[in-house]
Image: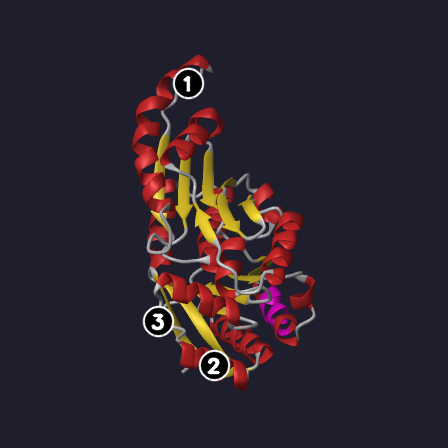
Amino acid sequence: MRIGIATDSACDLPRSFLDKHHIVILPVSIKGPGGEFVDNRLPEETQDFYKSVAENGDAEFATRPFSPDEIRDLFLSRLVLEFDYVFCITVMKTRSLIFENATHASLRILSDYRPIREQANVKAPFSLRVFDSANVATGQGLVVSEVARMIAADVSTLDIIRQLDKLTQHTQAFLVPSELGQLHSQARRRGDKSVGFLTYALGSALDIKPILRGYRGDTNPVGKIRGFEAGCNKLFEAARTLIRDGGLLAPTVNVSYGGDPAVVEQMPGYVALLADARPRNINVYLSEMSSTACVNIGVGGLSLAFASEKEVRFD
């Protein structure tokens, strides 16, 4: 059986990984001062978008996910022929309409695919499952990467679903902003009080960064640290501790950066993370941060995710 994965462009994974595993991207469009940007997870285009965000300061950005009709059209024109079973894994449903739109589209896809496959002389049935990753950025990417790993290992769909259910409950994605302006502006527009004006003013003056966590369908601050690099090192050290203690539920640590990933490769904490991970066969993926995450926490932010039953905080 040919098993495929579809996910939206909020998913943080390297382009090389997406291509290797034939992962199909549902683009997200972002409207800002410079016009509309369609995020297809292409590194060069993402880097150009970062520049636009940086040039426009704390300008307002609005995202638009694929509609149910667009998702239906993509599946019927391509995926129902390329695969026999598709896992569609979305960004957390509390932050976007993508899960809802994909769920609505799936009902029409499953009722409309038969004539298309019959015309192509494909007689086997087609199946589709939509899953809420319950996470964002690197957290969503970690869930997707684990499904891709299991597909490559020829694991059954039932076992993949069991692991998916576990990962959506235990994956933790942490985000540290480089600057607070964009984070504060976007939070204010959404009515999110997690980064209030006083926190913003004091944080900017004292270089105090919040550590935000995506976990079980919500995003909240779980600590604060003085200095961006110190915050990044906290995340790297948390992942290293779990690796050394055997506390990971999936053999992966996922990292993304709102800029050139080469910057992260030079960070001592990241180098130490690789040194702990490689001898233990733990995959470490590093990619550009998705444009949707970037407009929410600002250019230059860093995200790191792992799956563990140990709930990590930085209070």
**Range shown magenta:** 272-279
Name the residue at 39% across, 22% down. 124
Residue 235 seen from this side: yes
SS for tag 3? loop
164 left or right of 200 in image: left
Q: Which residue is mark 3?
A: 193
Q: Which residue is mark 1?
A: 116
Estimate the spatial distance between the alpha carbons at disc 3 and disc 1, rounded to whole Å: 48 Å
* Most foreground residue, 189 or 260: 189
Name the residue at 67% across, 49% down. 44
In the image, which is nearer the foreground, mark 1 or mark 2? 2
- Quick check: 24 above or below 11? above
Q: Quadrant of the C terminus?
A: bottom left
Q: Which residue is mark 2?
A: 201
Residue 290 within the segment the image draws in magenta: no
Estimate the spatial distance between the alpha carbons at disc 2 and disc 3, rounded to whole Å: 14 Å
- Quick check: 257 above or below 89? below
Amino acid beneath label 2: Ala
270 left or right of 138 in image: right
- Quick check: 299 above or below 6? below
Q: Main secondary structure of the magenta part?
A: helix
* Most foreground residue, 154 or 17: 17
Residue 174 seen from this side: no
First along the sequence among labels 2 and 3:
3
Amino acid beneath label 3: Lys
- Residue 173 x, y percent position in the rendering: 45, 64
